[in-house]
Amino acid sequence: MEDQWLKSLITKTPQEGFELAITLSRKGVRYTQPDPEVLKKLRPEYANDPEKLTAASHVIAVNFQTIAAANNYWK
């Protein structure tokens, strides 16, 4: 993993905030399972499972909520 990749939660727009939330979520997965071959092997298992996709969306939503709060909801 790159060192110090997350400089701030502050973004210019909600769209940038949402994209950061996705990045945070993906980085979390990569920190949890750093082996790219294992990730590749597991992808078909979760890519077609609605419950697992909903869980992934939930993680993104929680990250977006955190970023929105850090940005004072872009007021």
Image: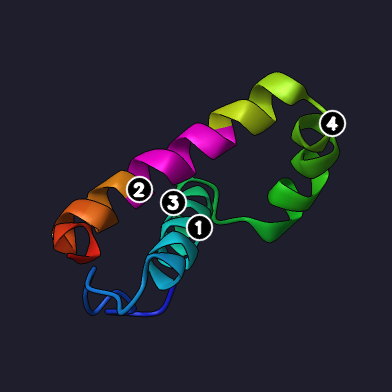
**Nearer the viewer's eye, disc 2 or disc 3?**
2
Quadrant of the frame with the C terminus: bottom left
- Point out the tag, 4 or 2, that comes first from the N-terminus: 4
For the residue carrying disc 2, how many other residues have a C-alpha within 10 Å: few (<14), some (14-19), or many (20+)?
many
Q: Position of residue 58 (x, y in %)?
A: 48, 33
Q: Mark 1 sits on what residue?
A: 22
Dot 1 lies on which element? Answer: helix
Q: In the rendered image of this protein, does residue 74 appear above or below residue 58?
A: below
Q: Mark 3 sits on what residue?
A: 28
- Point out the tag, 3 or 4, that comes first from the N-terminus: 3
Q: Mark 2 sits on what residue?
A: 63
Residues at marks 1 and 3 touching, judged by CB atoms closer than 8 Å: no
Dot 3 lies on which element? Answer: helix
Q: Position of residue 35 (x, y in %)?
A: 62, 55
Secondary structure mainly formed by the magenta segment? helix
User: Which portion, as a residue range, is magenta?
Assistant: 56-64
**Nearer the viewer's eye, disc 3 or disc 4?**
4
Residue under the image location 36 percent in, 73 percent down:
13
- Magenta stretch containing residue 58, yes or no? yes
- Point out the tag, 2 or 1, that comes first from the N-terminus: 1
**Nearer the viewer's eye, disc 4 or disc 2?**
2
Residue under the image location 68 percent in, 59 percent down:
36
Q: Mark 4 sits on what residue?
A: 48
